[in-house]
Image: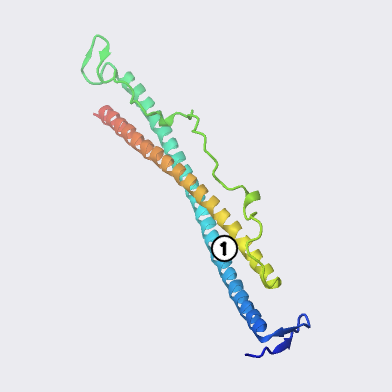
């Protein structure tokens, strides 16, 4: 029968068997490994969170650029409309000598209607559909009780608990970032559709004005 050798614990002063001491040493090593793992988890999730925040900030800058582009198209449209109105007035001045196709005070070229334009230029916007907020309230992020089961009950486990709580908070923040990015991208896609339609409308109006100019120069 194997003999049990007793050792006095430096922490408690109690005598412990070699087997008990071996188990405690293994638990200590496992605690160290777990601590390193939680530190690495926190580092990686924090890096991901920073990347997500940077991406969302870039999307907001992109949205500002889209706003400026759409505003420029609006200004171009106003200028083209003013040009169109001036050209129509000039056509009316030349009513009796414009094309030689005037019959009984009716002029074919002067009776043409102004170019119709899409509703995209109307300032009045339809009420957008209500957006369901799927973001996680900050008050609930990481509020899930203890994350680890304490064994050694020392400062290492305190740090592990803090690390896991930080990971949980970062995961919640990343989910909110993803939701915000999805909402922002959907908004950008809709705005790009409007910008494309405005560009097409301006192109049509420009061609119409160019035809009027060519006609008056003829």
Exactly how many numbered labels are in the figure?
A: 1
- Identify the residue shown where x is 58% and y is 65%: 42
101 and 170: which one is in front? 170
Q: Residue 129, position in %: x, y? A: 49, 33
**Residue furthest front in the image:** 1
The residue where tag 1 is placed is 46
8 to 86, vertically: above or below? below
Mark 1 crowdedness (10 Å alpha carbons): few <14, some 14-19, many ≥20: some
Q: Where is residue 198 in the image (x, y as percent from the top left)?
A: 38, 36
Give residue 166's quadrant in the image. bottom right
Q: Is residue 11 left or right of residue 210?
A: right
- Position of the C terminus, as image quadrant, is top left
On screen, 136 above or below 85? below
- The structure residue drawn at horizontal position 30% and vertical position 30%, both measured from the top left corner, is 208
Residue at the spot x=70%, y=72% of the render?
155
Q: Is 13 situated above or below 170?
A: below
Residue lying furthest top in this view? Answer: 104
Colouring style: rainbow
Q: Horizontal and vertical percent for residue 108? A: 24, 18
Residue 101 point in image, percent of width and height? 21, 17
Q: Which residue lies furthest to the left in this view?
A: 101
The answer to whether residue 217 is above or below residue 27 is above
Give the camera-side residue of 26 and 175. Answer: 26
**Image quadrant for the N terminus?**
bottom right
Q: Is mark 1 on a helix, strand or loop?
A: helix
Query: Foreground residue, 99 or 39?
Result: 39
């Amino acid at each position: 029968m194997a003999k049990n050798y007793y050792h006095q614990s430096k922490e408690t002063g109690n005598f412990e068997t070699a087997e008990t001491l071996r188990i405690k040493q293994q638990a200590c090593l496992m605690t160290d490994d777990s601590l390193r793992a939680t530190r690495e988890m926190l580092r990686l999730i924090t890096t991901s969170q920073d990347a997500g925040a940077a991406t969302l900030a870039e999307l907001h800058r992109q949205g500002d650029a889209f706003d400026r582009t759409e505003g420029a198209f609006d200004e171009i449209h106003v200028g083209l409309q003013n040009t169109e109105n001036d050209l129509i007035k000039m056509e009316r001045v030349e009513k009796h000598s414009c094309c030689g196709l005037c019959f009984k005070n009716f002029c074919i070229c002067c009776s043409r209607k102004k170019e119709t334009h899409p509703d995209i230029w109307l300032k009045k916007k339809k009420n957008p559909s209500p957006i369901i907020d799927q973001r996680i309230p900050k008050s609930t992020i990481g509020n899930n009780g203890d994350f680890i089961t304490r064994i050694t009950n020392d400062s290492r486990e305190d740090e592990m608990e803090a690390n896991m709580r930080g990971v949980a908070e970062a995961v919640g923040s990343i989910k909110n970032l993803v939701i915000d990015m999805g909402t922002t991208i959907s908004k950008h896609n809709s705005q790009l559709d409007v910008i494309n339609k405005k560009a097409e409308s301006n192109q049509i109006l420009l061609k119409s004005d160019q035809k009027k100019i060519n006609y008056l120069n003829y």
